[in-house]
Amino acid sequence: MAAELHPRSGKLIGLSNSNRTAQRNQPVQEFNHGLVLSREPLRDRDVFTVRIDKKVNSWSGSIEIGVTALDPAALDFPSSATGLKGGSWIVSGCSVLKDGRSVLEEYGRDLDQLGEGDRVGIQRNGRGELHLWVNGQDCGTAASGLPSRLWAVVDLYGKCTQVTVVSCEPPPDTEDQEEDEEEREEEVVSPSPAALTTEACRDHEDRTGALVLPAVPALATVMNGSAEEVPEVTRGHSRPDKFPNNFEPDTVLTEHQLFDVFNNAIVSLYRSEDEGGEDLGLGGAGGGGSDPSRAGAGSNNGARGGGGNENGNGGSAEGGGSTNNSPSGSAGGTAGTGGMTTNDALLFHEKCGTLIKLSNNNKTAERRRPLDEFNNGVVMTNRPLRHNEMFEIRIDKLVDKWSGSIEIGVTTHNPNNLDYPATMTNLRSGTIMMSGCGILTNGKGTRREYCEFSLDELQEGDHIGLMRKASGALHFYINGIDQGVAANQTPGVVYGVVDLYGMAVKVTIVHNHNHSDRLRRNNAIMRALSPDVGRPRPALSLTPDPEAPDRLLFHPNCGQKAAIIGDGRTALRPHATDDFNHGVVLSNRPLHSNEVFQVRIDKMVDKWAGSIEIGVTTHNPAYLQLPSTMTNLRSGTWMMTGNGVMHNGTTILDEYGHNLDRLKAGDTVGVVRKDDGSLHFFVNGVPQGPAAWNVPPSVYAVVDLYGQAAQATIMDDMADLPPLPDDNSEGPTAMSPGSPCSITGASAASDLRFHQLHGTNAVITNGGRTALRQNCRSEFNDAIVISNRCLRDGELFEIVIQKMVDRWSGSIEAGVTAIRPEELEFPNTMTDIDYDTWMLSGTAIMQDGNTMRNNYGCDLDSLSTGSRIGMMRTASGDLHYYINGVDQGVACTGLPPGKEVYAVIDLYGQCVQVSITSSSGPLDNSLCTSNITEKSFPIHSPVAGVAHRLHNKHGKNVVLLGDGCQAVRVGGYAHGIVFSAKELKTDELFEVKINEVDEQWSGSLRIGLTTLQPPDLPSCPLSGLSPSLTQLRSKVTWLLAGSEVRRNGVLQRQNYGCSLDRLTVGNRVGVKRCSDDTMHIFIDGEDMGPAATAVAKNVYAVLDLYGKVTAVSIVSSTLVEDTESVKAPSLSSDSCSEGEDDSTPCENEPTLVPMAMAFLENHGKNIQLSNQNLTAARVSSYNQGLLVTAQPLPRQQLFQFQIDRLNSSWTSSLSLGVIGHSPDRLNFPSTACCLKRSVWLLQRDSVFHNSLKICENYGPNLDTCPEGTVLGLLVDANGCLHLYVNGMDQGVAAQDIPTPCYPLIDLYGQCEQVTIVTNHVPAVGAESGDVRCQGDMEKADMVDGIKESVCWTPPPAVNPNKTCEYQALCSRFKDLLTLPDGYFNDDAKYNLCYCESCHKLRGDEAYYKRGEPPRDYALPFGWCRFALRIKPHCEVSNTFKKWHIAYHGTSVGSLRRTLDHSQLLPESSSVFSASPVKAESHGSYGEPEENSAPEREIPCVRLSPTMRYSGLEVFAPKVQFRDPRSLRCHHAQVGFQVCVRPGSYKVGPQSLGISEPLDPRFSNTEIEWITKEKGGTLLYGLLIRVE
C-alpha cells in the first residue's frame, strides 16, 4: 500500500510532497476542518504512521487518528474526525470513540501530549482489532470487531497543524509474535517471578520466623519481569512506577527509596489491573501453596484461576492454601485475570439513570451535565452480588458545586425491571444505602452515625466498597478499611447500586480489593530491608545489625497539607498561611518503653489560633487514613492539646501542664511512654507529670502541626540539629548560571523590589520581594505589580512563580512599561494600557494593547510553579525574555533606548504569587519566625523602643507587617478592624501613626476601647468581625468616629475634639483608659480630654482602618515590661492585685472585709431556702422563683452564686440583677420581668431597666449556662453594674446604680437551685478563694471552646413537647407526613415553637437582622419550626451569619421532593412556580453546555422575609388531618425557613393584588423576593401551622 494521503480532504487542508504532507491553513485562526484520509484502504497488519511536523499553542487538543469504513471519494467531510459516523473508530487524547461515542477511556498514550517529531500510527491486525502505535510502541487493543475494508484517518486538530506520512507497512516480527502468542495460549503457564519471590520469602519465613529477601540484584531481576527500560531510582519525592532493571553491587539506597520502589511496584500492579493493563508480568503474589508450579501468575486474589492472556498470565491456585487476607479472597470470589474481563466480572448494568454515560467496557459511569443536574445518576451492577464478594468503586471525578455526594448500597430490585428513581433514597423497598456517614433503609435513616468517614467528604481517588457476608451482614469499606456491620439481615439476592449524586460525577469499578493486604506485605518487606534507617551504606545488607541505631524519623505517610523533608527528620506545612489543619505526622516506628520523642518548633505563623499538638497512637501510619486533626480520631489515641489531654477525642484532663498554644519557635515538646504504661509529656525539657495510664505498648508518636505551628524537627543525639531558619536568610541562589544578571553581581540586583503602588487585588510582602493576588479563587485580575525603579540596559528582572490555582484560564503576563508607577492608573489587566507598554501574554507579544506577533518562542500560559520568567532591555532597544535562564530570543525591537522602562508583572488568572530572584533567592515570608519571643530568641522591633503589638485576629482586608507593629488595609474601604495584642493597663497609652491614606474614600480612622476578647474570635480572620467599628456590638465598645463618641454604635457625644476625618499621613492618634474609668483620645500627643466614662477595666485598644486611612504603625510602648499574663484586679479580701496603678481605690483605702450575704426570707412562693439561707431551690412549676439578698450589696464587692441544678424539661433559664429599694415588704410577682420600679435585670444576653430593654448582645446567653457555672454581680465605685461569669468580667451592663441596691435572682425555667459562693467556696477556675479573672487565663481557656474549663456549653436537648401542646400537635402532624428522619436535625433544641406563649416566654422580638449586609426578617409567630439537617461541607456557620433569612410557603405534596433536592424548586408550589424568565448569560446557574441554545427558560422561586405573606393560603394550601391523639380534625399548612445568599435575589412588590399592608415592618412594594439562581437557598427549617 502506498504511504500517501487521499487528494480529497478537509476544507482547510493543503497537500504537498506528493500528497505525503498535510498542512492546516490559517492555524492560528481556525482549529478544525483538518481531516485527511489514506489514499487506499489499509491492509491487515499495516501500520499507517505519520510524523507530527508542526504544532501551535493557540488551542487545546491535538492530533486525532483512527480508521473509517467510509470511502473518502464520496465522503462529505465533517469539521473533525469525531464527527465521522457509519463505522469509524477514532483515538482522541487518551479516549477511543466509535461513531462519535466514547467506548474506552484512559487508553494508551495521551495524543494531546505528543510533540513535534513524535510519530503516531494506526493498525488493524489480522483478528480485526484496532491498535495504536506511538513512536514504534504498541499501545494495545483499542477496539475489536472491525470490518476488513478501512481507511486510515488523521485529523489535524487544535495544536497539530502539519503532519507527514512516513510509512505504511507491518511492524517488524509481527507475524512471529502472533504465532508465538498462539503457541503460548496452549502451553502450561510457568510461575511468575513475583510468585517465586513470594514463595521464597514465605519458605524462608517458615524456617527462620522472620521475613527476609534474597540478594537485591536477584530480587530486582525477578521482580522486573521483562526487559523493558525503566527509569532509574532517584532520590527525592518522585516515586518510580516499576523496579529498576538492575542494581549495581555498590548501589546505595536509603530506606525511603526502597520503600518507594516496593510500594509503587505493587501499586502499579493493581493499578494496571484496575485499568485492564496487560503489560506487567506480575500477578498471583498471593497465590497459594508451597508448590510453585501451582501458584498461577495470573490468578486474581489467589482465588480461582482464569484463562491466559497475551503475556502468559494465567494458571490457577486451586490446590494451595491462599495467603490472601482481603475480603474478596475467600471461596466464591470473582474470577479473572489481571487484564481480562469475563462475563462473570462485576460491571455496571446497561440500564441506568437518565443522565448516566457508561464507558470503559461498562466499568466506568459518569453523570452528564454535572454542573446543571445533580441527580438521575443511579447505576447498578450487571448481576447480583455473591456472598463475601467485594463490590468496590473508585471516585474519579467530583465537582465543587452541589451539596451531598456519592451514595452506595444494595437493592433487591432487578435493574432490568426497575423504573430508576431520581435518587435511590426515594426507593421505599428492598434498598439499603450508605449516605453521608449514616445508613438509610428504604429511604429512612436507621443509623445516623454509622462510621467516622462521611461519603460527602471523600476526595477523588478514594475507594468505597461493600460486601454482603455469608451470614447476611452488610459491611462497607472506605479505602480498604472495614467500617463494621451496617445491616445484619441483608436479603440473599442483592445488586450493588451507586448513586452519582450531587458532587459525585464519575466512578470506576475496581476489580482488585486486596490493597491493604498488599500494603501489609510491602511493609513487611520494608521492615526486613531497613537495618540502618535513612543512612547511606556501602552495600545493601539484608540482615539487620542489632547494634545499629534505630533512629526515630517521621513516616512518609503524612497529612495532605504536610510534607517530610530533611531525611525524615523535619515535618512542615508548606502553605501554613492558607490552611490550619491536615498537618498530622507520625513516627516511622513504634516508641520503645522509656524512649523520649521530642521535637523542636522551627517555624510558626501568627494567623491562626491553636498550635502544635503531640501524643501517641496505636494506629500504624502505613495504612492509617489520616484525619484533618488528630483529636478527631476516636480510637487508640492520646494527645496533649493546649494545656489539656484528650483520649480518643474526649478531654480527660483540663488543666494539665504548660499551654502548648503559648509556645514559640525554638521551644521543644516531647512525649514518653514508660514501662508502667503511663504517658508523660515534656515542654522545653521540663516533665509535666503523668497524663494517662494503661497506654498499650507499641504506640507511634504523633505530632499535629496545627494552627500556628508550621514546622518541627525531631531532636535526638544522632546528628546535629539544623539551625533555625534565619529571618535574613533567603535560601540558595535561584539564578541560573547563564542568566545575564549573574555577571553583574549580586549587588546590582539586590535593590530591585516591587513598587508600593500596585493593583487593587495585589499584596506586596517580604520586604517588597514577593507579590501575591488576594482572594485568588474569587478574583482573577486587578493584580498588576511594577518594579520599584527603572531597569538598566542589559539588566535582567527575573521572578519565580511560587503559587498557582487551577481555576481560571490564562496565567501570568510580563513585560515593561515606560509609564512611571506614580503616573500609572492601574487597569484590570496590563494589556488594557494603550501607550508605552510592551507585554508577553501567552505566546503573543503585545504593544500598547495590540498584538504585534504570535507564536513567540515561549508560552507563559504553560508555565507551572517553580518556573522563572525574566525580561531584559538591551542597549539597542530590544526586549528579550528568559524562561528558566534560557534566552527566548528577541521579542520586539524599537523600545526607546534612552527612556526609562519599568518591569511589569500581571498576576492574572492561574498565577497567584511570585517572588523576585536574586543572588540570595526568593524568601517565603509566610513561614518566617515572626513571633519568636524574647524568652527563646530576641525580637528586634522595626521601630526602636516599641513594645506594643497588634493582635493576629483582625478584619479580613487587613495584613499585619513588621512583626505585628504595622497594619495595612489591602482592599475595599472597610473590614479593617485591628486590636491591641493585650489588654491595656490603667493609664497606658496605645498610639499609632498614619502611614498611608487613599483620598478616593471618605471617612477616616476610628479608635476606641472594647471589652471584646480577640482570642474569642473565630480562628479564621475572614469571619466573625463586623465590617466597621461602629457595627461592632457583640461586646461593649467605646469609640471615636470623626468627632462623635459612640457606645456600641449609639451616639453619646458630638463635637469631641479634633475630627479624625482631618488626619493625614504623619499624624498620631492614641487612646488611653485612665484610672477614673474614662477613655481619653490623644492626637499628636495632645490629650483631647475624657471621651467616655464608666469604661470597663479589662479592655483592648481597637482601631478601624476605615475610609481613606489604609496603613498605620505603632509608635507607643507599654508602661512596664510585659509579663506572661496581665492580671485583672483581684476581688478577694486579702490584697489588691499586682500591676494596678497607685491610685487604685483598693490601694488607697483600708482593706475591706466583705459583708456576708444570705437570701432574704421574703421570696417567691415556690422558693425553699436551706443551708443557712445560702441555698435556694424552686420546688414546683417553672416560675414564682424570685429571691433577693437580705443585705445590700456594697460597692466594689463581688456577689457570686453557683448554679446547682437545671431541669431540661423547661425552656429558658434564670435571670439576675439588682433592685434599688428595700425588698422586705416587696410583693413578688411571678417573674422578674414584671418588676417595674428601680430594677436592673440581666436576662439571656440582654439588659433591662424597669422591664425595658436598654442593651442587647451583652455577655453570654444566660440560658446556656450549665450546672456549676458561677455568676456574679458587682457595682463599682462609679455606680456601674458588672456581670461576672466564672470570674470573668463581662464589662459594664448598666450605669447609675443607686445605693443601696440588693442582688436579685429569678429561678425561672430550667434553673431550679443556686447557692451563694462564700470565701470558702472557690469559683470555678479560682484558687484559694480568689476569683479567676480574665488576665489569669490561658488562651486555650478563651479561644477553642473545647479545652476550656470555664466556658459553658449549650444545655442538654430540651423536649419542648412537654411544655407546649401546640408544638406537640404540630409534631404529630409532621409524623403523619412520613418524612425520613435523616432530613431533620437530631438535636431537638433547635426545634422552636412560635406560638404566643412560647415566644413570649423566650422574650422574642418580632423582627431581627441577619446577613451581610444586614436585612430584616420577621419571626414566624404562630408557626412551629423543625430544624433540618444541614451537610457539614455547606459551611453552615458562615452561611447562617452571612446569608439572609426568608420564608417559602409550599404544599404538603411538594415537601418530599424539595427535601430530596436539598433546595427550593420552582415546581414545589403551585403559586411559586411563577412564569418562567429568560436566563441571562450571567444569571443562570452553572456553565452553558457547548451546543446549548443561547437562551433557555428558567422558572423563578419567590420568597418573603415574613410568613405573613408566604403563609397565605394561596401559597401554602391548607390540608385537613385528624389528630391521632385527640381524634379531632385540624387544618395544617407547611412552609420552609431558608437562608438566602445575598445578591442572588431581587426585591419586588407582592404579586397578589392586595392593597392593605401585610406586615408593619415590610412595605407591600418590597415584601416579595424573587430568585432564579440554583444553590442560592439553603433549607434551614420546616415550618408547620395548625388551626
Image (tube, rainbow, N blue to C red):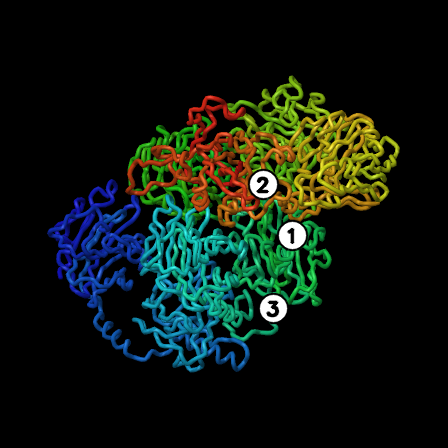
On screen, residue 1035 above or below 62: above
The residue indicated by pointer 1 is 641
Alpha-carbon distance for marks 1 and 3? 31 Å
Of tags 1 and 3, which is closer to the observer? 1
Which disc number belongs to residue 549?
3
Q: Secondary structure at mark 2?
A: helix
**Above or below for 567 versus 1090:** below
Name the kind of residue labelled 2 in the image.
Gln
Looking at the image, which residue sits at the far left? 73
Q: Nearer the viewer, residue 1427 or 67?
A: 1427
Q: Amino acid at mark 3?
A: Pro
Residue at the image point whose x is 32% and y is 57% from the top? 351
Quick check: 884 left or right of 1346? left
For marks 2 and 1, the one nearer the N-term is: 1
Q: Nearer the viewer, mark 2 or mark 3?
A: 2
Residue 107 in view (yes/no): yes
Q: Is residue 41 positioned above or below 1192 on the image?
A: below
Q: Which quarter of the rendering shows the N terminus? A: bottom left
In-image side of 192 versus 964 (left or right): left
Mark 2 → mark 3, Cα distance in angstroms: 70 Å
- In the rendering, at what x and y percent does residue 1077 appear? 75, 28
Nearest the eye: 1440 or 852? 1440
Compare marks 1 and 3 and give the one earlier in the sequence: 3
* Residue at the image position 16 percent from the left and 59 percent from the top: 150
Which residue in the protein does label 2 denote?
Answer: 1367
Q: Nearer the viewer, residue 13 or 600?
A: 13
Q: Secondary structure at mark 1?
A: strand
| Label 3 environment density (alpha carbons within 10 Å; few <14, some 14–19, many ≥20) | few
